[in-house]
Image (cartoon, rainbow, N blue to C red):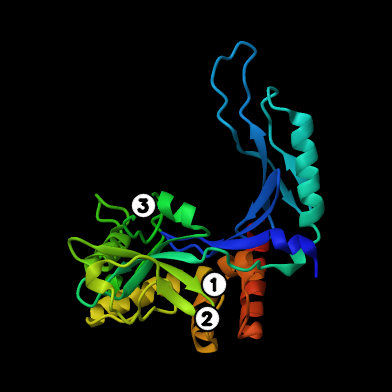
Amino acid sequence: MNSCLNNAFSLRRLNPINGTLQVFNIDTARALSSNGIHWEIQVLSDRPQGLWANMPYSGQQYYTFGLWSVSAGLKQVPVNPLFNVRDMIKSAEQLIEQLETVVEALPFPLADRYELWLLDEEEKQPVTLLQSCRTEQEMALNSAPKWIAAAQGDFSFISNHLLKRGLTNNDGYNPRVHASVLEATVRGRGGQNPTTLWFSNDQGGQTAYSQPIDVMHNEWHFPELPICEDWKEQEEKQLITDYIAYKAPQMLMLPGLNNATRDRLEQVAVKQAEVVERLWRLYPKIHNKELLNSARIEAKIRSANRK
């Protein structure tokens, strides 16, 4: 086994749901990728001090040093000359030398075993995954955010169900009406005073890390996807179905999905052929290879026609 794989792992990108981030690190540098092709190279370095600086030493932190891919190599970004550039170059070279030996093993295994879930107000069951992290220390640093369907400035979520009801996505005041309706629906499931709970996701299953009194006797029922599909009202179900179809290319990056779920996601993901083409390298498993290959070919044709 390649010993460098011990330095390789992935993290879920949540709130909004955006698949996984691939991480490879050594003592002095790390590489991050959301598609398995392009990697941001970050180097651990002291904060640069000016010639007459009297600022206290603040420790080391990561700084972006360049972008790397197998085909293009390293493209270094401009670096403050006050950095120790020689050491940064050395760290980047060492990182890339090892990274080249593990890129064929993508996707890397998930490492974020701690999960923060929003619980249903009535039944106190998990509704949606808000955050995840690797360690108890990271868990303590995270707050409980409100669930969001899309990042600020992203107006791309369109619900066919809401369109059929005559609700446009831009009403002249809000350019993301559909995302706002979805967010209100999901958050509403948690009630006015939402309960969130950290769980430890181990090989034996998910167990509550710390339990409030009113949920400590619960038998937990986790959704397979990062958002619950069990809703009482048909309108809510249709809205969630539209959102899962919208995020299907990213959800296919998650490990542990059963074949039926993966097949269902693939059937709708291929409608976003160019997103599938960008992300498919990070799919742990492909259920219908012919279907996804057809989508990838379609994406390449579209890209060629735009040139």
Marks 1 and 2 in Cβ contact (< 8 Å): yes
- Front disc: 3 or 2: 3
Q: Amino acid at mark 3?
A: Ser
The local secondary structure at tag 3 comes to loop
Q: Residue at x 59, y 70 (%)?
A: 276
Task: Name the residue carrying label 3.
Answer: 143
Q: Is residue 20 left or right of residue 226?
A: right
Residue 3 lies, in percent from the top left, at: 78, 63
**Mark 1 Cα shell of 10 Å, populated few (<14), some (14-19), many (≥20):** many
The disc at residue 257 is: 2
C-alpha distance separating marks 1 and 3: 23 Å
Q: Amino acid at mark 1?
A: Leu
Q: Is residue 279 above or below residue 74?
A: below
Q: Is residue 294 above or below residue 146?
A: below
Q: Residue at x 24, y 69 (%)?
A: 213
* Residue 17 seen from this side: yes
Q: Residue furthest top?
A: 52
Q: Quadrant of residue 200?
A: bottom left
C-alpha distance separating marks 1 and 2: 7 Å
Q: Is residue 3 left or right of residue 31?
A: right
Q: Residue at x 68, y 31 (%)?
A: 78
Residue 295 lies, in percent from the top left, at: 61, 75
Residue 103 lies, in percent from the top left, at: 75, 62
The local secondary structure at tag 1 comes to loop
Marks 1 and 3 in Cβ contact (< 8 Å): no
The quadrant of the rendering that contains the N terminus is: bottom right
The disc at residue 254 is: 1
- Front disc: 1 or 3: 3
Residue 84 lies, in percent from the top left, at: 73, 28
